[in-house]
Amino acid sequence: MMTVGTDWSWPVLNKMARYYLDPFGCVKNQVDAETMMGALDRSGWAVAADPVEADLIIINSCGFIKTAKQESINAVLRYKKAYPEKKVLLAGCLAQRYASELAESLPEADLLFGNRDLARIIDAADSALHGKTRALVPAEGALPAEGSPYEGERPLLSLPGSAYVKISEGCDNRCSFCAIPLIRGPLRSRPVEGILRECQRLLDRGVVEINLIGQDLGSYGADVFPNPGLPRLLEALTRLEGHFWVRLLYIHPDNFPRPLLDIIRQDPRLLPYFDLPFQHGSPGILRAMNRRGDPQTYLSLIEEIRTALPDGVIRSTFLTGFPGETEEDFQALLDFQEKARLDWLGVFVYSREEDTPAYALKGRVPGKLATERKARIEAQQIPITQERMERFIGRELPVLVEEGFTPRASALGGEGKLYLGRLFSQAPEVDGAAVITSEEELVPGTLIPGRVFARAGFDLEVAALPGGFVS
């Protein structure tokens, strides 16, 4: 197993300083933000609810695509303008990827801190506060050591009852359009034992939904085990006791481990929800993206999943405007979408990123045309998703309550209360919601039994049922 060199020590400050952290980007970045908050809290810093109360403002940035990069830079400028007397620390992916450039061009950031060694946030925060240096951006990545806030002892930025657990760092897939290997480095898998400890501690804190994340869960353990590591991890998770959900997010379809299907079928706590970023439906574009699969292989995988798990829910992402994408390629993508009948779909316009292989490709697609193609894909997906969600109407299913809403007539008759939550078919933040009516007061962060009685757009309407958890 990989050795871990990070030293999580907890020096206590002589004077309690306050920090405010503003997170940007994906949920992997969210876990990084939570981990940094946990380290700062344990070392003597105090979190501020508002930047006006903070001595240090931390922006945990995204550096994946152009729009996200600009958003993070704008945040630095905005905070420094509003609070010129405060120190601003730019952390995360953008700082990691462009440390040298930003050190010269962004003086509004008092310090740059990368994402390869989160334990050093304590040093970075102290340096930012006292002006000791301009950057702490390690070139090599280290996984958190035992006892770090990674293992469940950190603030959670998710809605009640839900948490993300990162099982690996980096990526070896090398898709030609993707900057992740430049930002986060090669694949580094966490030990199974540490992941189990983290999950158990989160369950002990009342978490009922564990979302496993990584750049590609299907590659988990490829740097450690001779066989796919994700099935081994899931089998270990089934030995934990209690009523909870485990959701898998981001499995590269070229690396999908088939043993997952049998393991998920045997334990209802392992949700039949799969996030498989197919990206395109044209063989030529897929080859240019450095993907090994082809449209027919991907359609066969979808059919295999749905045959093994009839309740299987599949989310994916498509990319429009990749260099060389012709009208014929785009039509192939539309045809693939129609055949795949995906439950959920996100569509993105290609972002030309420096130092990626696709950056030098010819045949650039005008941004306006790529955006129009994105809109056509999204319009075609609306009736598909609505149809796929209707299969749950009439079913009794567990629902995760996330937040209260306003009173209204209850679906069970009489006056009731309205809540928002999610079914197993809805991942946090990206899919539709469950609109729950209940005659009794519900507690956010709990799993309750419910009956789906209608669809409203992409959302499902659910009547809360009396009793305990429905497995």
Image (cartoon, rainbow, N blue to C red):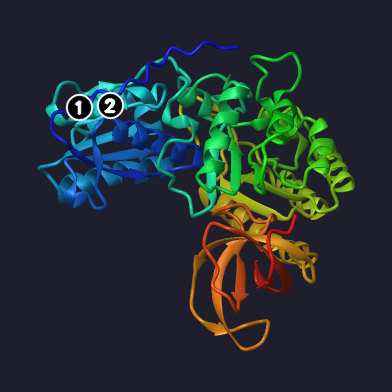
Residue 193 rendering spot, x and y as whole percentages: 60, 23
Is residue 348 visible in the rendered structure shown here?
yes
Q: Quadrant of the C terminus?
A: bottom right
Q: Amino acid at mark 1?
A: Asp
**Quadrant of the rendered image containing residue 60:** top left
| Towards the viewer: 77 or 117 | 117
Q: Eyeballing the image, is 348 above or below 252?
A: below
Q: Which residue is mark 1?
A: 126
Element on which disc 1 rests:
helix
Residue 19 rendering spot, x and y as whole percentages: 24, 41
Q: Amino acid at mark 2?
A: Ile
| Towards the viewer: 430 or 179 | 430
Is residue 258 visible in the rendered structure shown here?
no
| Towards the viewer: 252 or 226 | 226
Residue 283 rendering spot, x and y as whole percentages: 77, 35
The mark tally for this picture is: 2
Q: Eyeballing the image, is 10 above or below 300?
A: above
Residues packed near mark 2 inside 10 Å, few (<14), some (14 to 19) or many (20 plus): many
Q: Which residue is mark 2?
A: 122
Q: Is disc 2 in contact with disc 1, using a CB cutoff of under 8 Å?
A: yes
Q: Eyeballing the image, is 22 above or below 40?
A: below
